[in-house]
Amino acid sequence: MDAVYSKLLTKVIIKAEENGPLMVEVDGKTTITLCRCGKSKTQPSCDGTHVKAGFTATSSEIKIVE
């Protein structure tokens, strides 16, 4: 892989938190939390409503790394 090209790539991880939102991390920093329960008043962002709504879901993780 070309050295210049490899410096442009970022590491992206999308984590589905157990009973919570999707956490999008870029280069190790959380950039946004996305609602999974559908009840957030700040869609598409999570506002914590999943706790009061009793939302349940399993956790999972997707890594996008070159």
Image (cartoon, grey):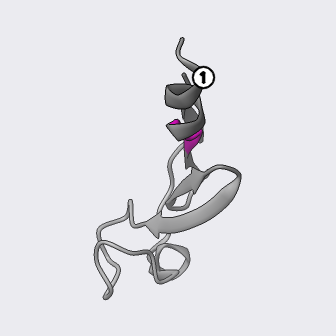
- On screen, 13 above or below 66? below
- Mark 1, residue position: 3
51 versus 55 height, above or below: below
Three-letter code for the amino acid on which mark 1 is drawn: Ala
Q: Position of residue 6 (x, y in %)?
A: 57, 27
User: For the point 38% across and 59% down, which residue is it?
Assistant: 36
Tell me the residue at 52%/36% (across/down).
Answer: 9
Q: Position of residue 22 (x, y in %)?
A: 49, 55
| Viewer-proximal residue among 9 and 12 | 9
Position of 15 compared to 38: left or right? right
Q: Quadrant of residue 23?
A: bottom right
Magenta stretch in the rendered image: 9-13
Q: Residue at x 65, y 49 (%)?
A: 27
The N terminus lies in which quarter of the figure? top right
Q: Is residue 4 rendered magenta in the image?
A: no
Q: Residues within 10 Å of mark 1 (few under 14, many from 20)?
A: few
Q: Main secondary structure of the magenta part?
A: loop
Image position, residue 20 (x, y; %): 55, 61
Pick the residue in front: 23 or 58. 23
